Structures are given as structure tokens and as C-alpha cells.
């Protein structure tokens, strides 16, 4: 049994009736919690006002949605799985003028009255530099307008009046986002506005500022020139912004040039003498570590098997039959080159045969000798 105040929450008292298991779960936004509950009055009879078990099904609550009673999320965040506990919650009674009601709890008339109040609160917070808080006020005012506008017929006078109010608040909201460096969200919201209302100068101006911050030079220049077309009185301000844009683009180009220059310089930098010496030493080590079984080609030729040598000689002899036959001895006057034969007559042929029989040289055959030996003359 435990009877203590709920830590960090004023006005809530907790009494654990039955302990749960394990540690308290992490209730992140979007977590669904299933539980049974019973709401009772703090009187002697403990009168039950609501009981989920009588209904026959448990209650489901999604963390972050603030369903039904906001305090339920606070109570459940302190419980373990399987735990049964009692909670006593103090009641605070406030008059209508003593608190600010949520937008969803207002009527249409009350919502329209709340719009200028939220608008002024957002402007004051913006001037104080509290941009995130200002966005919340602008969003509440936009929510009130859109809720009422949804009940009007589109593009009629009441609808257009509310649309103009919503656009003004949306542009103020975008101006806060611009100070918070949420440039792409600014581009998204302002594009939606200028697409439906192309004559809204402030929409083009804020979008041009956002494009300038994300290096979209062409888009920024187009928006700034459109501002001048819609309002020539903005010439001085736009001229200053265009000068800032040109300066920022020059800085960006110089930054990119130096970045890529350093990249290519690093890739093609010459080696130092120390790096060259280290490379040579690695090459020598790799040669020393080469496998010993890799022999010189000349040694392999010398170590060729005897069975392969005759085979190679036979191939050579078949390819060069003239070298295989005994060489025919020639005189010194004979020219070793071949000449194309000239046509001869029959008488010349008979005379040549007679001369050949009379002066036929003697052929000498000999065994092949080494290339360095002399050849005998016939």
C-alpha cells in the first residue's frame, strides 16, 4: 500500500491498491493504453459516476490526443502494467474571465472574437523575439477562422473575408518560421497562398527570402521581381535584398571552388621523396617474396626432356625439306640466288644437253657439320 502525492503534479493524490509488474512503460506520443476505470464522488457513499466494467469493454486512450479528461494521461503515465490504483484529484473552479478556453471549446461567435486577441498576442511575442510561442498564437487564430470558414460557401463574400484574415495570419506565421530557419516550410505555405492569390505581394516576398536562404538564386530573383511588379514602392527594399543575394551566391561559388580545388589537389598531389623511397622498398620486398618455383625461360628450355627434342627436330625438318637433303655444292662463280628462267628454243635445249653431258660437275655429299666448319669446294 502506498499513499503519497503524485510526483511533479500538484493537486493529485495516488494510492496503489495492487502493484503492477516491471518498470513504468515509456508513454510516448501515439501510444495506445487500454484500461478499466471507475469514477466516484468523494463522499461517504463513494457514489459511482462511471464504470467501464459495467459497460463491458475497457477504455482505450491514445497518448497525446488529450481525449475526454486531460488529467487521465497524467494518471496513466504513473502506472505500471497490471497496477490498480486510486487517485484523488482536486477541483479548481474558475470564472469565464479567469482562464483562456481552448479553441475547440468555443462557439463560432466566440471563435471570431478570439481571432484578433490571438493575433495581437502573436504580434507581441514576435516583437519580443519569442517566435515559437508566437507561432502557437497564430495557429490558434487560423484554426478558429478555418473552423468557421468551413461552414460558409466557398468564394462568396463571407468566405472571402475569412480567407483574407487567414492569409494574413498565415503570412505572419511564415515570418516566424523564417526567423526560426524553417525555410522549406515557408516555401510550402507561401506557395499555397500565391497559387490561389497571385496578387498577394507579401507572399512572394517571404518566399523570395526563403529561396535566398537555400541558394535558389533563380527562384529568389523571380519572386523579388514579382514583388516590384505588384508594389513599386518596395524597390529600395528589394534592391537591398538582391544585393545580399548576389553577395551570398558569390560566397557560395567561392566556397565550392575552394572545396573542389582542394579535392583535385589532394588527388593529384606529387609524391614526396619519402613516399617514393617507401614505394621502392615495398617493390623490393614483393620481389623477394616471389615464389621460388618460377624459373627463367632459358632454364626451362635447357631442362626440356629428351623425348621432346627429336619431336621438335622432326617438325623443323618437315617445315624445311631443303635443309634435310644433302646440300648441293656450287662453284664460286655461281650466284646463290634464284633467277627467273628465260624462254629458250628447241635448238638451244639440244645444245645445252650436249654441253651438260660433257661438262657435268661431280656432286659431293657429306654428313652435316657444325655451322663453324668449312664447306669443301667441288
Image (tube, grey):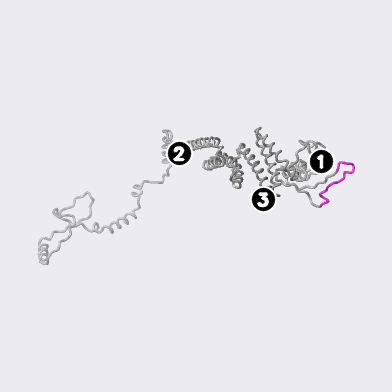
Mark closer to the observer (3, 1)? 3
Mark closer to the observer (2, 3)? 3
The percent coordinates of residue 170 (x first, y second) are: 64, 42
Q: Mark 2 or mark 3: which comes first in sequence? A: 3
Residue that badge 2 annotates: 264
As drawn, 370 above or below 353: above
Q: Mark 1 or mark 2: which comes first in sequence? A: 1
- The disc at residue 154 is 3
- CB atoms of marks 3 and 1 within 8 Å: no
Q: Is residue 164 visible?
A: yes
Label 3 Cα crowd, 10 Å radius (few <14 / some 14-19 / many 20+): few
- Residue 362 lies in what quarter of the image? bottom left
The percent coordinates of residue 16 (x first, y second) are: 81, 41
Question: In the rendered view of the protein, which quadrant contains the N terminus?
Answer: top right
Task: Say whether residue 264 is left or right of residue 231.
Answer: left
Residue numbers of the magenta segment: 41-55
**Residue 44 belongs to the span the image colors magenta:** yes
Q: Give the residue furthest to the right.
A: 44
- The disc at residue 27 is none
Cα separation, mark 1 vs mark 2, equals 70 Å
Q: Give the residue furthest to the bottom.
A: 346
Cα separation, mark 2 vs mark 3, equals 60 Å
Count of picture labels = 3
Cα separation, mark 3 vs mark 1, equals 49 Å
The percent coordinates of residue 252 (x first, y second) are: 51, 37
Label 2 Cα crowd, 10 Å radius (few <14 / some 14-19 / many 20+): few
Disc 2, SS: helix
Question: In the rendered view of the protein, which quadrant contains the C terminus?
Answer: bottom left
Residue that badge 1 annotates: 87
Label 1 Cα crowd, 10 Å radius (few <14 / some 14-19 / many 20+): some
Q: Give the residue furthest to the top.
A: 128
Disc 1, SS: strand
Amino acid at each position: 500500500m502506498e499513499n503519497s502525492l503524485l510526483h511533479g503534479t500538484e493537486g493529485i493524490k495516488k494510492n496503489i491498491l495492487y502493484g503492477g509488474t516491471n518498470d513504468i512503460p515509456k508513454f510516448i506520443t501515439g501510444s495506445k493504453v487500454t484500461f478499466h476505470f471507475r469514477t466516484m464522488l468523494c463522499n461517504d457513499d463513494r457514489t459511482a459516476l462511471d464504470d467501464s466494467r459495467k459497460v463491458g469493454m475497457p477504455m482505450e486512450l491514445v497518448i497525446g490526443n488529450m481525449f475526454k479528461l486531460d488529467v487521465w494521461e497524467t494518471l496513466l503515465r504513473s502506472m505500471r502494467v497490471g497496477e490498480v490504483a486510486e487517485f484523488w484529484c482536486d477541483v479548481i473552479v474558475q470564472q469565464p474571465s479567469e482562464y483562456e478556453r481552448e479553441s475547440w471549446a468555443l462557439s463560432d461567435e466566440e471563435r471570431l472574437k478570439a481571432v484578433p486577441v490571438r493575433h495581437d498576442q502573436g504580434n507581441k511575442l514576435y516583437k519580443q523575439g519569442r517566435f515559437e510561442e508566437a507561432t502557437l498564437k497564430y495557429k490558434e487564430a487560423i484554426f478558429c477562422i478555418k473552423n468557421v470558414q468551413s461552414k460558409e460557401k466557398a468564394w462568396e463574400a463571407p468566405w472571402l473575408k475569412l480567407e483574407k484574415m487567414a492569409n494574413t495570419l498565415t503570412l505572419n506565421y511564415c515570418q516566424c518560421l523564417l526567423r526560426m530557419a524553417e525555410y522549406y516550410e515557408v516555401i510550402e505555405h507561401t506557395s499555397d497562398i500565391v497559387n490561389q492569390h497571385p496578387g498577394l505581394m507579401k507572399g512572394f516576398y517571404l518566399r523570395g527570402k526563403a529561396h535566398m536562404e537555400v541558394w535558389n538564386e533563380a527562384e529568389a530573383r523571380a519572386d523579388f521581381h514579382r514583388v516590384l511588379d505588384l508594389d513599386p514602392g518596395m524597390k529600395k527594399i528589394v534592391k537591398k535584398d538582391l544585393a545580399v543575394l548576389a553577395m551570398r551566391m558569390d560566397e557560395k561559388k567561392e566556397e565550392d571552388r575552394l572545396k573542389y580545388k582542394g579535392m583535385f589537389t589532394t588527388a593529384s598531389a606529387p609524391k614526396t621523396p619519402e613516399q617514393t623511397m617507401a614505394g621502392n622498398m615495398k617493390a623490393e620486398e614483393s620481389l623477394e617474396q616471389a615464389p621460388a618455383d618460377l624459373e627463367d625461360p632459358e632454364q626451362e628450355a635447357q631442362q626440356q626432356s629428351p623425348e621432346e627434342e627429336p619431336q621438335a627436330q622432326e617438325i623443323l625438318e618437315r617445315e624445311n625439306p631443303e635443309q634435310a637433303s644433302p646440300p648441293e655444292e656450287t662453284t664460286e662463280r655461281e650466284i646463290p640466288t634464284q633467277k627467273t628462267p628465260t624462254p629458250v628454243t628447241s635448238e638451244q635445249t639440244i645444245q645445252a644437253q650436249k654441253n651438260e653431258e660433257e661438262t657435268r660437275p661431280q656432286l659431293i655429299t657429306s654428313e652435316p657439320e657444325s655451322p663453324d666448319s668449312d664447306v669443301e669446294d667441288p
